[in-house]
Image: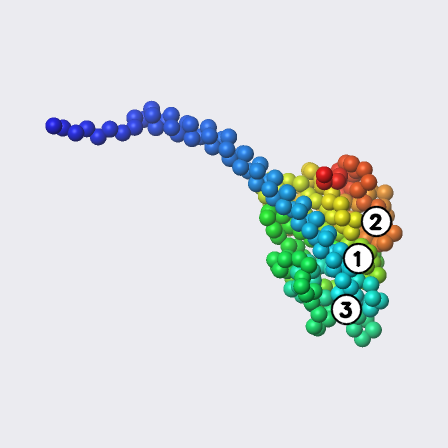
Amino acid sequence: MKSRNQGFTLIELMIVVAIIAIIASIAIPNLLSARLSANETAAIATLRNLASAQAQCQASGVIDGDGDGTGEYGFFAELSGSKFVRAYIGGAQAISPTVKISPPVLSGAFGNVAGSNVSRSGYMFRIYLPDTAGKGLAEDATGGAALNVANILPDYCETTWCAYAWPINRGNSGKRAFFVNQQGDVLQCQNVVMSYNGTTVMPVADAAFDTASVAPALTIVNVALAVTNANKTGKDGEAWSNVQ
């Protein structure tokens, strides 16, 4: 008795391939959208966590660059305990040779600073502190403030800071950009004007500030941000509004 091996016909194979293609055309965009949403949600949560960490740092007084007993806000590497903090040494602000925030108020992963930024879950993050002119100063390229310690103004760091989050790869890892400062409110923009993207286009310190505010960007008297009204245009031309 002869046996006969049977398989798929060409038409059957073509039908299967077509079905797979249809399923992929539906599933892949949904997966991409879900990933974008997850990354954006994680970025918002990170900024809210950062706001809490900054409040803890300032209240603890562990960073005190002018020795007046009032704590100051910090950079990622300081908050994560990976770098020594600013202190008042020999009558001037300097980097302490012995003091780190312990226990740290942020995960040690935030100590991995590259190009003044921290990368997590498809987003880049950067903190700005006020310099001696009141303008936003970014963290040292590898974290902390050792290289820029003389340019940071302790009095303003007692009251003012801000941070941004934007996609590492706009359109693939996220779309919106986000902002937070000492007020604790997270702002968002659709990121369609500036198209903040990785290290190619990054937010400057006063990007989300009200266009009516005047330079310098981060001084105590100049904290009028695009937080008071929904869809208010920032200095970067983006419409910034509160994340609900």
Q: Measure the alpha-carbon separation of dots 1 and 3.
A: 16 Å
- Kindly identify which numbered label has been placed on residue 223: 2
Residue flagged by tag 2: what amino acid is it? Val
The nearer-to-camera label among 1 and 3 is 3
> Disc 1 designates what residue?
130
Q: Secondary structure at mark 1?
A: strand
* Quarter residue 151 falls in: bottom right
Classify mark 2: residues with Cα within 10 Å, few (<14), some (14-19) or many (20+).
Answer: some
Q: Secondary structure at mark 2?
A: loop
The location of residue 104, given as percent across then percent down, is 67, 62
Q: Is residue 202 above or below residue 56?
A: above
Of residue 86 and residue 190, the one placed in the foreground of this image is: 86
Tags 3 and 2 in contact by the CB under 8 Å rule?
no
Q: Is residue 33 above or below residue 150?
A: above
The location of residue 113, given as percent across then percent down, is 64, 58
Q: Measure the alpha-carbon separation of dots 1 and 2.
A: 12 Å
Q: Secondary structure at mark 3?
A: strand
The colour scheme applied to this rendered structure is rainbow
- Kindly identify which numbered label has been placed on residue 18: none
Residue flagged by tag 1: what amino acid is it? Pro
User: Which of disc 2 and disc 1 is earlier in sequence?
Assistant: 1
The location of residue 149, given as percent across then percent down, is 76, 65
> Furthest-right residue in view?
221
Seen at 84% across and 61% down, the residue is 155
> Disc 3 designates what residue?
87
Seen at 78% across and 51% down, the residue is 182
Classify mark 3: residues with Cα within 10 Å, few (<14), some (14-19) or many (20+).
Answer: many
